[in-house]
Image: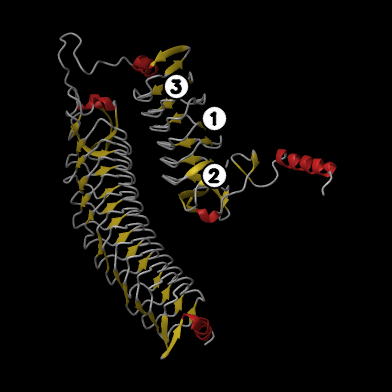
Amino acid sequence: MRKRKLVIIMAAILASLLVCGCGKSGGGGKQAVEFAPETDFKVADVAGGVSITGYLGDGGQVNIPDTIGGKPVVEIGFMAFYREELTGVTIPDTVVRIDEAAFSNTLLVSVEVPDSVTEMEQAVFMNCTELESITFPANITQIANNMIQGCEKLTSVEIPDGVTQIGQFAFSGCTGISNITLPDNVRQIHKWTFYDCVDITVTYNGVSYTYDELENMCNIINGVTAANPASDTESGETAELKPEDIFYFSEVDGGVCIDEVADPGYLGVSYGFGSDGVVEIPKEIDGKTVVEIEYGAFSGCFTVTSFKVPSTVRRIGGMAFWGCENLEEIDFLWADITEIEQGTFGECTSLAEISLPYKLIRIGEGAFSGCSSLDNVLVHDKLEEVGAGAFEDCRNLRVFYFTETLTKIEEAAFLNCESLESILLQSNVEEVGAEAFKNCAGAKTIMLSEGISSIGESAFENCTGVDGIIFPGSVAKIERNTFRGCSGLEHVSFSEGTIIIGESAFENCENIGRVLLPEGLTEIEKNAFAGCTSLSLVKIPDSVTKIAEDAFDGCESIMVSYNDDFYDYDDLDALYEMINNQ
């Protein structure tokens, strides 16, 4: 039994180690923490180190390491932890930038952003509905658009003294905040910064303003006297607004770019551009052709139900319509654009059907992610690439036409599209990314054409509705978990050219009855067919030289044919030894 004196001494030593900051640390090195494994993160090289671009862990409390692969973590990338089940996070003081929507829609309860961060893009913590406490870094100068929109459990926020600009909807829906003080240095603030915070009182320069008085406060801060858009003060008649009254714009090659909406409340109402929620984006502003729509230009315009984009537009920037939760229709069929950029229509939860532009070549990362009402996407015969997470979590998407021109489907492109009815990949498709169609349980048909050279891990995992697969020989390796959990799968046909069946490739495909493995196959990895409880006959070609000892684990009804001999489940160990030692 340990003596009390020894316990006290050991406690004192431990306390001194913590005070000294010994051991691993994060969040500025304030306390000892256990870093999450480096394998929990996807990263990309950026200037000065690496950016975290995705998360592969189980959620909960996540302590981000300060280095990954020997390089400092300097950035949390675009939507890196979006919709992950994080309840807490420690951000290391190596991070200097946090990109758009990096932690949005997570379960964070409390977060402290280290002072090393100098740049935070829009919507970083948007819709973190469990968030109760947040500490902003001292060195930022801007609270960007939608920063903590919808964080309804927050009761107080301290804005750093150096902040000079606060964007639209930055605190919208933070209904638990009753009082907030703006730094005297703020020189620009959007009219809709505190939208829907009806019980709030905002103090600026020693003066307090109720919710109904915030427009006046904004005018004072911005140094302007806003005209009443609804009426002419002398005649009392409805005023006619010009495009330059509604949109901020800048000159670009060939015309102008719409940078931002001056006031989203003007859009889609009787006295604004369009009516009944319908907005027709003008072809000209100030006598110049509208050719571009900038990043985030219409983000969060929740009064709009329909946008009409003129044919003159050649580029729509990322996040341009992100979070337009009441948007039901986007008419841009004739727009002169070849790419829909990252997050352009993300979280447009009312969008049900869309016809993509005729000239479209690429759908970018997260372009329609979280469009939970999207049912049908009409695609034309120029599309070549579907980006990572492009339709992720579009759970009602039934129909997507995979064109003959399509060559590449990136990782998680259709992840969790559980209503997608068929996946018919035509002959020009060369690459299918990891988790591209994972959890597409509604798909009854999967067609893989010869010519595909790469299919990523878990590409079709848990596609429980499909009953048959013809696997092309153009794919040399069936990667880890490719068809894992496809419980409806009964028939699998292989072609010569496949040389490796990867770990857990068909694990728990419990209805597969017979498998004839192709000539030329050399290796069957761990758990490749484990849990395939209906598997009764497998023919292994003589070309196989390596097989994992649990390749057919749990397949108790199996009979394996190899080199003209037959082996039942109890004889498999002898078979494995024979193959591996030849």
- Residue 61 is marked as 2
Q: Nearer the viewer, residue 399 or 554?
A: 554
- Local SS, label 3: loop
Please name the amino acid that badge 3 sits on.
Val
User: Which comes before the other along the chain, label 1 or label 2?
Assistant: 2
Tell me where residue 62 appears, x and y as whole percent: 54, 46
Q: Residues within 10 Å of mark 2 (few under 14, many from 20)?
A: some
Please name the amino acid that badge 1 sits on.
Ala
- Local SS, label 2: strand
- The residue wearing badge 1 is 138
- Local SS, label 1: loop
Give the left or right position of residue 499, taking residue 402 as reference. Answer: right
Cα separation between marks 1 and 2: 24 Å
Q: Nearer the viewer, mark 1 or mark 2?
A: 2
Tell me where residue 69 appears, x and y as whole percent: 56, 56
**Residue located farthest toward the front when viewing the structure as drawn:** 557
User: Which comes before the other along the chain, label 1 or label 3?
Assistant: 1
Which image quadrant for residue 485? Answer: bottom left
Q: Nearer the viewer, residue 329 or 257?
A: 329
- The residue wearing badge 3 is 186
83 to 427, vertically: above or below: above
Which image quadrant for residue 287? Answer: top left
Instruction: Please report contact status of discs 1 and 3: CB closer than 8 Å, yes or no.
Output: no
Q: Nearer the viewer, mark 2 or mark 3?
A: 2
Give the left or right position of residue 352, taking residue 119 as reference. Answer: left
Which image quadrant for residue 304? Answer: top left
Tell me where residue 152 appears, x and y as whole percent: 42, 30
Q: Nearer the viewer, residue 486 or 147?
A: 486
